[in-house]
C-alpha cells in the first residue's frame, strides 16, 4: 500500500499535537532515563563494594609449613622448617593459576632513626608482595632484582613508620634507619591503606628483600610462609589444588602421607563478597523492574487516553476512506516514532543524570551496556504495544460511533 | 482545465446517470431486547447533478439514511447502489475505499484535524489514495480550496479560522477526491444565519458546476434552495418533490440586514 503516505500522515499527526507527542514521549524518556540512572548507581556501588573486598585480597592464598608431627608431637607452624626456598621457586614456576608468589619471612624488632624509635615488623618478601596485598609504592620505588640477589640492606616503609621515625616531616627517601642494629636504606614509601577490617594498621610495615631478612637478620634457610594470589577469586580453589600437588611432589610425600604444609585462602572473605554482590544484584533487578513497570504504566496511560481522545479523529479518517489497517498502521508508526525518539532522548538523559550524580553526589556509577539496551527495548516495546493496542480497538470501531464520539 | 471538467459534468448531467439507487432500504437496530426500525423500506434514485435535501425531524431516520448513503453503515435489507456499485456485498475495507473515491462528507461540526493547515486537511482523503502523487495531491487541494474561496488561506491552521472558514475547508476536503456525491450533514447547523447562507451559496455554486449534492437537515427552510426535497418520517419516505422554484441563496444573502 501507500506506506509513504501513512508515514506522512503519522508524522503530521505527531507534529499537529506537539504537547500530546511530548507527554507520551515523556513517559518513555523518564522510564529509560530512570532505569539507566538507577542501574548505573547500583552497578557503581556493586563494583565499589566488590573492589573494596578484593582490595582486602579475596584471591590471596597463604601457605604455611606444618600439620606434620614429629614423633606424635605437633609442632608450632612457625618453627617448622619444611617450607624451603626451592618450594617457593617450584610454586612460582609450575603453578599456572597464580598471579603473584612471594616468600615471606618475618622478624619483629625496634626501628630506630636518631632519637625516634618504634616497634615494627620487618617482612622479607619479593616485589610480588605489593600486587598480592594490593599495595602501591607512592614515593620512590621498590628494590630491584640485584638488591634481592645481593641481600642488600634496603627497605620500603609504610606511612605509620614514616610518622613515627620522621615526625618533623623530612623526606624519608634515601635516609638510613636501623632495624635493631642493622642499617637499612629507605628506597620507597608505601601508599597509605589505613586499617584493615580486623583493626590492624596496614601502614605499620617495613618491607625488605627476603634474602636480606633470611641471611642478615634471621639467618635461616627455610621460609615462614609463601603468599600467592590466584589469577581470579573464582580460581582460588583450583590454584590451591595445584599448589598442593606441586608441594607434595617437592616434599616427596607418598599417597598415604599427610600434607606437611597448610594452605589457607580467604574463603570467608570471598563468601561474604559473593553474598554481598548477590544481594546487590537482586536489589538492582528489583529497582530496574519497578522502574520499568512504572515507566510502562505511564506510557500506557498516556497512550490509552490519547487514543480515546482521538476517537473522533479516527472516525473522520475512516469517513474519508481510511481502512482499519490504515488507522492501525498510522498509530503503530506514531508509537514507533515516539518510542524510538523518546528512547534515544531517555538514554541521553539517563547518561547525563548518571554523570551528574557522579559529579554532584560523588557516588560511584557505572553504566552497563546491557542496562541501556534493556531499558530502551522494554520502554520502546511498551510504547509500541500500548500505542498499538488501543489503536487496534479504535480501528475496529464503527466509523459512525467514532465520528459522533464526544 | 476546470472549465473542461464543468463541461464534462454538464454533459453527463444531460445523460442523467443515476448516482444513487435505493431499493426498499430497511435498517433495524437492536436495543436491548427491542428492535427499533429506523428505516422501514425507503426507495429513491438520485441522478447526477441533483441537489437533494433530505429532511425529517429527529427520529425520522435521516441520520441512519445519511450513514447508509455514506457507506458508513449497511442496510439490514434492501439494495443500495452507489455509482453502479452494490454496497451490500462489500466488505468493510471495500466500503472504505468506495467512500474514499466516491463520497465527500461535510459534517455539522467540520471535523477538521486540529492544529493542521487548510491544505493538509484538504489533502487528507487523497492521503488514503496511494495512486496520487504528493505533487498532484497538493495541487488538487489548492484547487479545491480556491474553489471554496480560501485561496488566500492555504496555510492557515484550523484553530486560526472562523466557523465559516472551517466549513469551507471541510467542503474543499469533500471536493478534493472529485466524488460522485457530496453528503452534507447539517452543514450549516453550527453557523450563524449570514454564514449559513454563504455556505449555501457555495453549495449552489458547486451544484451549478454539475456536482451531485445531498443535504441532510432538520431545517425545512433549506428546502427552498435545493432542486429536490425528500421528507422522511418514522423511517418512511413521506414526500419526494422537485422544487420548481429554486431560490438563489446569494439573493437571500444580499437581502439579509447588514450587521455592524
Image (cartoon, coloured by chain):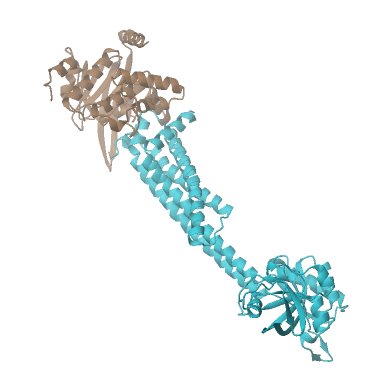
| The N terminus of chain B sits in image quarter | top left
Q: Where is residue A152? Give x, y as percent.
A: 81, 74
Q: Colour of chain B?
A: brown
Q: Colour of chain A?
A: cyan
Taking A7 as reference, is B200 above or below it?
above
Left or right of residue A121, residue B75 in this image:
left
Q: Nearer the viewer, residue A5 or A43?
A: A43
Q: Residue B221 falls in which quadrant of the image?
A: top left
Q: Residue A52 falls in which quadrant of the image?
A: bottom right
Left or right of residue B56, residue B126 in this image:
right
| The C terminus of chain B sits in image quarter | top left
Taking A204 as reference, is B214 above or below it?
above
Q: Where is residue A3? Give x, y as percent.
A: 49, 30
Taking A92 as reference, is B46 above or below it?
above
Can residue B218 be seen here? yes
Q: Residue at x 40, y 43 (%)?
A: A22
Q: Residue at x 79, y 83 (%)?
A: A66
Q: Residue at x 56, y 55 (%)?
A: A367
Amino acid at each position: 500500500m501507500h506506506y509513504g503516505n501513512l508515514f506522512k500522515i503519522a508524522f503530521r499527526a505527531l507534529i499537529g499535537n506537539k504537547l500530546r507527542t511530548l507527554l507520551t514521549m515523556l513517559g518513555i524518556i523518564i522510564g529509560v532515563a530512570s532505569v539507566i540512572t538507577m542501574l548505573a548507581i547500583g552497578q557503581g556501588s556493586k563494583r565499589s563494594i566488590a573492589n573494596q573486598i578484593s582490595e582486602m585480597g579475596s584471591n590471596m592464598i597463604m601457605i604455611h609449613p606444618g600439620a606434620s608431627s614429629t614423633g606424635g608431637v605437633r609442632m608450632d607452624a612457625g618453627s617448622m622448617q619444611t617450607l624451603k626456598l626451592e618450594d617457593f621457586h617450584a610454586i612460582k614456576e609450575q603453578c599456572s593459576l597464580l598471579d603473584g608468589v612471594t616468600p615471606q619471612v618475618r622478624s619483629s624488632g625496634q626501628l630506630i632513626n636518631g632519637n625516634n624509635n618504634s616497634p615494627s615488623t620487618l617482612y622479607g618478601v619479593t616485589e610480588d608482595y605489593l600486587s598480592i596485598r594490593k599495595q602501591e609504592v607512592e614515593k620512590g620505588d621498590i628494590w630491584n632484582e640485584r638488591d634481592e640477589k645481593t641481600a642488600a640492606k634496603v627497605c620500603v616503609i609504610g606511612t605509620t613508620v614514616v610518622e613515627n621515625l620522621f615526625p618533623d616531616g623530612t623526606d624519608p627517601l634515601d635516609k638510613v634507619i636501623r632495624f635493631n642494629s642493622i642499617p637499612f636504606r629507605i628506597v620507597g614509601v608505601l601508599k597509605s591503606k589505613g586499617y584493615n577490617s580486623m583493626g590492624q594498621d596496614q601502614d605499620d610495615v617495613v618491607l625488605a628483600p627476603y634474602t636480606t631478612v633470611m641471611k642478615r637478620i634471621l639467618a635461616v634457610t627455610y621460609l615462614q610462609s609463601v603468599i600467592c594470589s590466584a589469577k581470579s577469586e573464582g580460581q582460588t580453589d583450583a590454584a590451591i589444588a595445584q599448589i598442593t600437588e606441586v608441594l607434595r611432589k617437592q616434599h616427596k610425600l607418598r599417597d598415604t602421607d599427610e600434607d606437611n604444609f597448610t594452605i589457607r585462602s580467604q574463603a570467608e572473605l570471598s563468601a561474604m563478597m559473593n553474598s554481598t554482590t548477590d544481594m546487590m544484584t537482586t536489589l538492582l533487578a528489583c529497582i530496574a523492574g519497578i522502574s520499568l513497570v512504572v515507566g510502562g504504566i505511564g506510557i500506557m496511560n498516556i497512550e490509552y487516553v490519547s487514543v480515546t481522545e482521538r476517537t473522533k479523529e479516527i472516525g473522520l479518517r475512516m469517513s474519508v476512506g481510511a481502512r482499519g489497517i490504515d488507522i492501525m498502521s498510522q498509530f503503530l508508526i506514531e508509537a514507533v516514532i515516539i518510542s524510538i525518539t523518546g528512547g534515544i532522548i531517555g538514554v541521553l538523559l539517563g547518561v547525563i543524570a548518571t554523570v551528574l550524580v557522579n559529579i554532584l553526589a560523588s557516588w560511584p556509577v557505572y553504566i552497563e551496556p546491557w542496562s541501556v539496551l534493556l531499558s530502551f527495548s522494554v520502554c520502546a516495546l511498551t510504547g509500541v504495544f500500548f500505542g498499538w493496542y488501543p489503536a487496534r480497538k479504535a480501528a475496529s470501531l464503527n466509523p459512525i460511533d467514532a465520528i459522533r464520539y464526544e | 482545465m476546470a472549465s473542461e471538467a464543468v463541461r464534462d459534468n454538464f454533459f453527463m448531467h444531460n445523460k442523467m446517470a443515476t448516482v444513487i439507487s435505493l431499493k426498499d432500504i430497511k435498517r433495524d437496530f437492536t436495543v436491548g431486547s427491542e428492535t427499533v426500525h429506523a428505516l422501514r423500506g425507503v426507495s429513491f434514485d438520485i441522478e447526477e447533478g441533483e441537489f437533494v435535501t433530505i429532511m425529517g425531524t429527529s427520529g425520522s431516520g435521516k441520520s441512519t439514511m445519511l450513514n447508509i448513503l455514506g457507506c458508513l453503515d449497511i442496510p439490514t435489507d434492501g439494495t443500495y447502489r452507489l455509482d453502479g456499485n452494490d454496497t451490500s456485498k462489500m466488505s468493510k475495507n471495500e466500503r472504505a475505499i468506495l467512500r474514499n473515491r466516491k463520497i465527500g462528507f461535510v459534517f455539522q461540526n467540520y471535523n477538521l484535524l486540529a492544529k493542521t493547515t487548510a491544505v493538509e486537511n484538504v489533502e487528507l482523503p487523497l492521503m488514503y489514495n496511494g495512486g496520487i502523487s504528493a505533487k498532484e495531491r497538493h495541487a488538487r487541494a489548492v484547487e479545491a480550496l480556491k474553489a471554496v474561496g480560501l485561496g488566500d488561506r492555504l496555510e492557515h491552521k484550523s484553530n486560526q479560522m472562523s466557523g465559516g472558514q472551517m466549513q469551507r475547508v471541510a467542503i474543499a476536503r469533500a471536493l478534493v477526491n472529485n466524488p460522485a456525491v457530496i453528503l452534507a450533514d447539517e452543514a450549516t447547523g453550527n453557523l450563524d444565519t449570514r454564514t449559513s447562507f454563504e455556505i449555501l451559496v457555495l453549495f449552489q455554486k458547486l451544484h451549478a458546476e454539475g456536482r451531485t449534492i445531498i443535504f441532510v437537515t432538520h431545517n425545512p427552510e433549506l428546502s427552498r434552495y435545493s432542486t429536490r426535497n425528500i421528507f422522511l418520517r418514522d423511517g418512511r419516505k413521506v414526500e419526494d418533490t422537485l422544487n420548481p422554484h429554486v431560490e438563489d441563496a446569494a439573493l437571500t444573502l444580499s437581502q439579509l440586514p447588514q450587521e455592524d
